Amino acid sequence: VPGGSTFFWRGSYGWDLNDRDTLETQLNVFADFQPKLSQAAREADVLFLANIQPELQREVRSQCRDARFVALDSMNLWIETTREALIETIAEVDCLMLNDAELRELTREPNLIRASRQVRQWGPRVVVAKQGEYGAAMVTEEGYFGLPAFPLETVVDPTGAGDCFAGGFLGYVAAHPDDEPEHELLCRAMAYGTALASFNVEEFGVERITRLTSEEIAERVGELQRITRFDEKPIALRD
């Protein structure tokens, strides 16, 4: 938009990088934006409604009616100022992705399992709760699945980790167009989302992501599988 300014968010991270304070949000050109998608975009197989006003998300959703899997992200600003509109938009998607604090705030429910059940009653069949350094959890009709974050000693910039998680998650779904996006496939998608997010936080902005190779991603997904797998050996319990 000539002469316009981009959407702007400013936040502050403290000692605990899982928590951040929103200091300023400027809608700028998004305030009057009316999305008009190309025909190719309208035919998207997998759709991600990234964080912006719920009304804009709903407009994009209305232009992509043939998408087989639609996910939505949001933030505390829209939960606090446009909650009802956000819930109406959530009803039109397959998957809601929020961080754990946002999920609790949206549903007014402190327990993540009950909060996820509440969201599923609104329409989505999949709920993903992003939990920063503690990983992510997913609730579907088939049950619960959780993954830890990839263990890192150095975290440079957590900004954008949630978007990278969504990109990895939905990218995996999009890479399997002949498979239904059911629980088992989405569990594997969680691993790819977790791996992508772990690379993102290693450097500032998207610097690390721009140099990523498919081999690096596969190696990190394999390591996630290794550290979350164990063999059951029952013990004899006394009666």
Image (cartoon, rainbow, N blue to C red):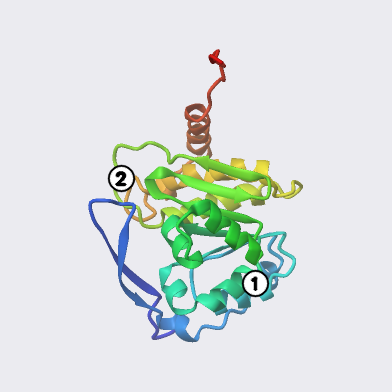
Residue 155 — which label?
Answer: 2
What's the residue at 57%, 72% (across, down)? 87
* Residue located at (46% from left, 72% from top): 79
Task: Point out the residue furthest to the left here.
Answer: 15
Looking at the picture, how far across and down is residue 31, in whole percent?
A: 46, 84
Q: Is residue 25 above or below residue 185?
A: below
The residue drawn where x is 63% and y is 66% is: 122
Q: What numbered label is drawn on residue 137?
A: none
In the picture, the quarter occupied by the C terminus is top right
**Crowding near pointer 2: few (<14 within 10 Å), some, many (20+)?**
some
Q: Is residue 74 visible?
A: no
Rounded to the nearest angstrom, the CA distance separating label 1 from label 2 is 35 Å
Q: Residue at x 49, y 79 (%)?
A: 82
Q: Nearer the viewer, residue 146 or 114?
A: 114
Location of residue 76 in the rendering, given as x and y in whole percent from the top left corner = 42, 69
Q: Quadrant of residue 61?
A: bottom right
- Say which of 80 and 2 sits in front: 80
**Is residue 167 placed above or below 224 in the rendered structure?**
below
Which residue reaches farthest front?
239
Along the horizontal axis of the image, is 64 left or right of 135?
Answer: right
Left or right: 85 as drawn, with respect to 15: right
- The answer to which of marks 1 and 2 sits earlier in the sequence is 1
The residue singled out by tag 1 in the image is 61
Left or right: where does residue 88 sit relative to residue 28? right
Q: How far across and down, in percent of the image, does residue 172 sit?
A: 61, 47
Give the SS element for disc 1.
Answer: helix
Can the viewer see residue 136?
yes
Q: Amino acid at mark 2?
A: Val
The crowding category of the residue bearing disc 1, from other C-alpha atoms within 10 Å (few below 14, some 14 to 19, many at least 20), is: many
User: Is the residue 190 above or below the residue 90 in the image?
Assistant: above
